[in-house]
Image (spheres, rainbow, N blue to C red):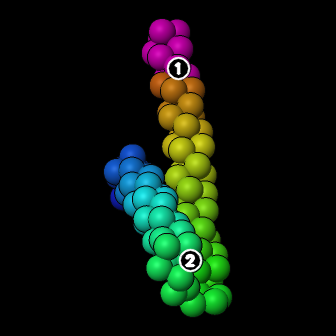
Amino acid sequence: FRSLVEFAEDLLMVFLKLFVVILVFLAVLLVYLLYSKFIAKTAILGWFSTVTIGLMNLAMISLGFFIIGILLLNLLHQQNNRNQKAIYRLVEKV
């Protein structure tokens, strides 16, 4: 677990990049849907909503991991700062 904390910033960036990739894929999928529905008139009923719901779930999960990770990392940095201040005060008194 501690090794994951050491590389937390890198891991959070992976989740953020995954979120961006999923959003780009959703945009491309939306353009394809509009093309197949209104221009080509060959849309298959029901497939787009199923794929979109799955991709939106993935996007929300990756965004949730990113937000929770940022909050936990912020708490960890605040806790480390408090410990360093307490050690500084202890050394200052001696």
Residue placed most toward the observer, 12 or 24: 24
Name the spot of residue 63 as percent of width and height, x first.
Answer: 56, 56
Label 1 sits on a secondary structure element that is: helix
Local packing at callout 1 (Cα closer than 10 Å; few below 14, some 14-19, many 20+) is few
Q: Is residue 30 above or below residue 7?
A: below
Task: Measure the alpha-carbon separation of dots 1 and 2.
Answer: 63 Å
The amino acid sitting under disc 2 is Lys
Residue placed most toward the observer, 11 or 52: 52
Residue placed most toward the observer, 61 or 43: 43
Label for residue 59? none
Quarter of the figure that contains the N terminus: bottom left
Part of the protein shown in magenta: 85-94
Q: What secondary structure characterizes most of the magenta part?
A: helix
Is residue 1 among the parts visible in the rendering?
A: no
Local packing at callout 2 (Cα closer than 10 Å; few below 14, some 14-19, many 20+) is some
Q: Does the magenta portion include 10?
A: no
Q: Residue at x 57, y 26 (%)?
A: 82
Q: Residue at x 60, y 57 (%)?
A: 64
Label 2 sits on a secondary structure element that is: helix
Q: Give the number of marks.
A: 2
Q: Is residue 6 above or below residue 53?
A: above
Name the spot of residue 91 as percent of width and height, x first.
Answer: 46, 15
Image side of residue 88 versus residue 82, left or right: left
Label for residue 85? 1
Mark toward the start of the polypeptide (1 vs 2): 2
Would you name the residue on which mark 2 appears? Answer: 37
The amino acid sitting under disc 1 is Lys
Image side of residue 57 versus residue 36, left or right: right
Is residue 77 among the parts visible in the rendering?
A: yes
Proximity of marks 1 and 2: CB atoms separated by less than 8 Å: no
Name the spot of residue 34 as percent of width and height, x first.
Answer: 54, 69
